Amino acid sequence: MTCRLCGAPDPRRFFARGKGYLDCPQCGYVGLEPTLFPRRDDECARYLLHKNDSADIGYRNFLETFVKALPKIAPGARVLDFGSGPVPALSDMLRARGFIVTSYDPFFAPGKAWRRHLFDLIVAHEVAEHLRFPGRSLGALAGRLSIGGWLALRTRFAPDSDEEFVRWWYREDSTHVGFFRARSFVFLAGKLGLELEELSAPDRVVLRKPRKLPGGVTQGEGAACARA
């Protein structure tokens, strides 16, 4: 077995109320054992039970706390709402702010067109915990960032101790198959070549694609040198 976030071998196996988990000593990611992943139709059915109604004031306020803390980008910027869900309320809120928004969801807004574009901002709101292969998925998102672009995520940080993890309510959702500790994102930023702009408990992360390559050369300058 290897860690599904960083690829390190031999993550530590432990159990929480009958479920097996793999805890990576290198990056701190805790993944549900793959044999326990929900069936795809069961996963979809679970998402359809979510009460993510854009007309619901409580849900809109919850989204607003995320939107208001996003990096400041100008109207007209390209934004990807990755994992937009059955009711793309976040996409609608971002469009209302003047952004050009692409919604993607493997169940409710499928397609690969987003892989052909670069984005100034990619948001993944309560999505990372559903990713079966987070290293692969987050790497793909990093590759779709424009220079200086941001990747903003909201996902609850996992507790450090086994005892707290066993009692943790967030792991009880059958579609939550992997969990990140705060240090997982520090490791991930280095792995993906991104800058860690924000890491705020209990659930906020912002990563940025740097404007400069190592040595202080801007990416634009590097590209010009390569063409020369």
Image: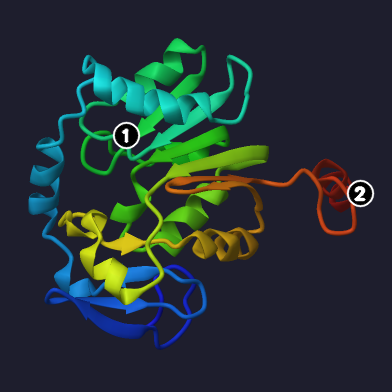
* Image position of 14 (left or right of 161): left
Sequence-wise first label, 1 or 2: 1
Q: Secondary structure at mark 1?
A: loop
Residue extending farthest bottom: 10
Q: Nearer the viewer, residue 112 or 178?
A: 178
- Colouring convention used in this rendered image of the protein: rainbow
Disc 1 crowd, CA 10 A, few/some/many (<14, 14-19, 20+): many
Residue that carries the numbered disc 1 in the rendered image: 84
Q: Quadrant of residue 121 in the image?
A: top right
- Residue ID at (25%, 35%): 85
- The mark found on residue 178 in the picture is none
Disc 2 crowd, CA 10 A, few/some/many (<14, 14-19, 20+): few
* Image position of 58 (left or right of 161): left
- Residue type at mark 2 is Ala
- Residue ID at (16%, 41%): 47
| Labels 1 & 2 near each other (Cβ < 8 A) | no
Q: Nearer the viewer, residue 44 or 72?
A: 72
- Residue type at mark 1 is Ser
Residue that carries the numbered disc 2 in the rendered image: 228
User: Horizontal and vertical percent for residue 149?
Assistant: 63, 37
User: Horizontal and vertical percent for residue 126?
Assistant: 34, 43
Please tell me whether residue 139 is drawn above or below residue 37 in the rendered image: above
The CA span between labels 1 and 2 is: 41 Å
User: Horizontal and vertical percent for residue 87?
Assistant: 23, 26
Choose mark 1 or mark 2, whichever is in front: 1
Q: Secondary structure at mark 2?
A: loop
Q: Nearer the viewer, residue 21 or 79?
A: 21
